[in-house]
Image: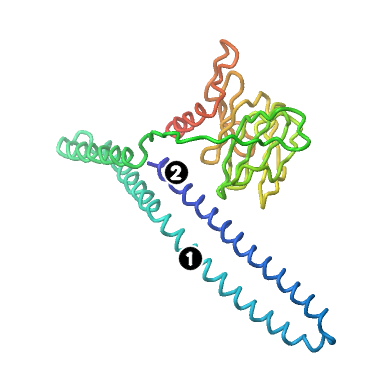
Amino acid sequence: MKQCQTYQEDRMKSLKVSYKEHERLIVDGLRVNIVSYLREFETSTVNTCTTHEHMQYPISEMREEIKYLLADFEKSTIKEKKEELNLKQAPLKVVRNSCIRLHYELFHLHVAIPKVLGKPELSFIASKKCLENIQQSNMFINENFSNKVFTVNGKSVHNVKMQGDSYTCFITAVCALPNGQVLVADYYNTKVKLLDQQYRVVGHMDVRVRPLDMCQITPTEFAVAMSNKEVQFITVSQSQLAKGRKLKLQHYCKGIAHNQGDLYICSDTALYKFTLSGELVCRLYEDSSADLTGKNHGGFILITCVICTEIF
């Protein structure tokens, strides 16, 4: 139930970030167009008039009118987007609240059952109530979080090679941003590239070491597993990529995933749990009987995250 609740809250946060970015782009675009128009108007007007003082009043008057129009536009646009966001978040909130309620009921039954042991009537009532709640929880999870079957309707091929690339692009990791942009790790060219919604390269960063995997920490921060036993954090803001802190590890970092404030990192033969500050929490799995037994791929890490949530 806690996992379901966290999943819904993450979706709500992602929607909120996406809509804020969309609002900002709309308003910024309108501002740029108005400023450009004003400059053209001032230049053409001043060049065709004999005295600048004669036109100062009409220009200032136009500025005031445009300023009020822009303010009204911002208010109406933001109001519409907030209403749209609330509509999309409403079903997510319903599911989240149901998760909280079911978790609360199960928790209190878990606490109550040991207290009524030795009392047959109360034990029977508590056990029956517990089974009913478990059935309700299972039905709820099956209805809202059941495995989905995806059908591929088509595919498209996009070339992310850019000027300065010395080798054929080899993409080892992909992360989607809330605004529709995509971050990819290019192994051979030692770069992390930012693609727009049409999958064109609009930004990049030379990481100088071959990136092996990547995961999203927040809507704007990403962790990149590097081939030199390091994790490089990268921030994406307004199509600009900036390097952040680094984590130096004692083992290879072949796969990486983030879950509820922790990092799960695969080496060749083991799976580790770290805090975001780089502190080793524990070694979750190890098999040194052969090479590459650490299940170093994202699917295994994500499954392990679910298991770990139950264990810890």
Vertical position of residue 52 compared to residue 12: above or below: below
Residue 154 numbered tag: none
Report the front residue among 305 and 110: 305
Vertical position of residue 75 compared to residue 233: above or below: below
Report the front residue among 51 and 184: 51
Give x and y (percent) for residue 265: 59, 29
**Type of the residue with mark 2:** Tyr
Residue wearing tag 1: 80
CB under 8 Å between callouts 2 and 1?
no
* Number of other residues with Cα within 10 Å of mark 1, as a class: few under 14, some 14 to 19, many 20 or more: few
> What residue is drawn where x is 62% and y is 25%?
254
Give the spatial CA distance, label 2 vs label 1.
26 Å
Q: Secondary structure at mark 1?
A: helix
- Which image quarter is the N terminus in? top left
Instruction: Give the foreground label among 2 and 1.
Output: 1
Among the 4 quarters of the image, the one containing residue 88: bottom left
**Type of the residue with mark 1:** Glu
Vertical position of residue 23 compared to residue 222: above or below: below
Q: Secondary structure at mark 2?
A: helix
Give x and y (percent) for residue 121: 14, 38
Among the 4 quarters of the image, the one containing residue 292: top right
Among the 4 quarters of the image, the one containing residue 87: bottom left
> What residue is drawn where x is 61% and y is 39%?
276
Give x and y (percent) for residue 37: 70, 71
Task: Please give left or right for residue 5 compared with residue 109 in the image.
Answer: right
Q: Residue furthest left?
A: 121
Q: Residue furthest bottom?
A: 54
The image's colour scheme reads rainbow
> What residue is drawn where x is 73% and y is 40%?
205
> What residue is drawn where x is 59% and y is 62%?
26
* Number of other residues with Cα within 10 Å of mark 2, as a class: few under 14, some 14 to 19, many 20 or more: some
Residue wearing tag 2: 7
